[in-house]
Amino acid sequence: MTETTTPATRFAVPGRIAVNAEAATVWQTATLTEIRRETPHAATFRLAVPRWPGHLPGQHLMLRLIAADGYVAQRHYSIASAPDGSGHIELTLDRVPDGEVSGWFHTVARPGDTVEVRGPLSGFFAWPGDRPALLLGAGSGVVPLMSMVRHHRARGLAVPLRMLVSARSPEELIYAAELGGETTTVFTRSAPPGTPVGRMTAAHVAPLLAEQPIGGWEAYVCGSNGFAEHASRLLVAAGQPVERIRIERFG
Amino acid sequence: MNVTRGFTGRARVHNPGLPPGQYDARDDWPVLSAEVTPDLAATDWSFRIDGLVERPHTWDWEAAHQLPASAYDGDIHCVTGWSKFGVRFGGVSLDAFLAMVRPQVSATHALAYSHTGYTTNLPLADLTGGRAWIAWEYDGAPLPPEHGGPARLLVPHLYFWKSAKWIAGITLLDHDEPGFWEQNGYHARGNPWEEQRYSGD
């Protein structure tokens, strides 16, 4: 046998948890039980998945829709809900222009409809609630981060958690009514009088990195590739170690 | 499979080049790397092959460009569901690098690693026979950093997470050793035509 090789690296990125291979490969039927509008372009879809194996905040699943002729469309979606053992999970979906899957959810879906899911998938972006978490999101990138915030609240965790979230306007801010003292909002296009409008900057990130918790932050960045590039550069420039920045890019 | 009420989907693409479960991304080229895009200049880039080889070797940017140029014209497939048709990458065939280091007969697998520390594992057979490249051009221009520039591994017949961005080296092994996504539940080989997305597929 050859030696196990470990390349010299600045990118530790171990998976945070072991992934259940069976859950990742078996398709299950999920029944839509509730639809809640979040913003003009986003809604939350609650699904009953009786044999859901449980997940950690930050994980995603694969979902598929099947047409009468057998045509299949499948997409990866982040899980919005905290793990709660209820046999239900929630997804918050942006309506994507010409999106065949998000379009179905936003215009056709109603409670009682069934879709198929498999997961949860990937341990990389998962947050078990063990280490201080610094969350940066934009648009629907807030979805997996909200699962972490909800988990933090539901379990009454003492470990520090802060979120910096960017939206075009207050109307476009997903989960606006649910955000609390842990969250700082940034509005890029319009904001109430007296609130600055503009892109996330070093000035938003600096105060968060100034309050270093014991052991430092694990940073989780989620959003479009453009946002992910911008936000991750801000973090690096502010001194966050590059190997403690996890990025989920929505493609 | 249960038919989804009211779902028709987009216009059917009868493209024999589209693997099962994939859709045509057309002009989009999504970026899905899990780490910070490194600030890596071509002059700081290097590529090494070691492990079970007769002569381990490291190439810098200039030395790699002395090898015979080779292009890939074809399609790429991402495990997240998109495929992209008719892309053109320029670089050097991995066969040209391997010919210089001479793999030992015991070498069966490879672990590719990036300048960021990202890793991915492949059977050695998937890296030989004109099916893998070190690529530094896309569509005639330098490969952009977010797509793996200055240079990435290109193994287009497998899901694209195998085509490690910011490629730094390949270690040849006599066993399979899971890389970054493979440790996170993804398939050891990742053949899109057999939908080998996750471990167990």
Image: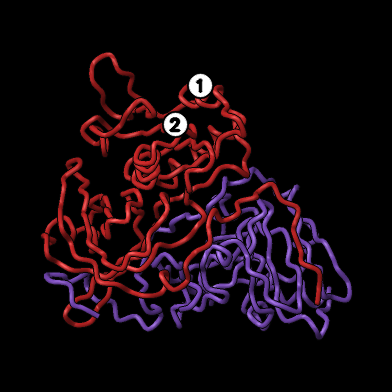
Chain colours: A red, B purple
- Which quadrant is the N terminus of chain A positioned in? bottom right
Residue B11 horizontal/vertical position (percent): 22, 72
Q: Residue at x 61, y 71 (%)?
A: B71
| Residue extending farthest top | A194
A99 to the left or right of B25: left
Q: Are marks 1 and 2 on the same chain?
A: yes
- Which quadrant is the C terminus of chain A positioned in? bottom left
Is residue B148 visible to us here?
yes
Above or below A232: residue A115: below
Q: Residue at x 69, y 79 (%)?
A: B124
Q: Quadrant of residue B117?
A: bottom right
Q: Identify residue for label 2.
A: A162
Q: Residue at x 19, y 76 (%)?
A: A67
**Secondary structure category for the residue under label 1:** helix
Q: Residues within 10 Å of mark 2 (few under 14, many from 20)?
A: some
A87 to the left or right of B42: left
| Residue extending farthest right | B55
Residue A144 horizontal/vertical position (percent): 38, 47
Q: Quadrant of residue B109?
A: bottom right
Q: Identify residue for label 1.
A: A207
**Of callouts 1 and 2, which one flags the residue occurring earlier in the amino acid sequence?**
2
Q: Residue at x 69, y 68 (%)?
A: B111
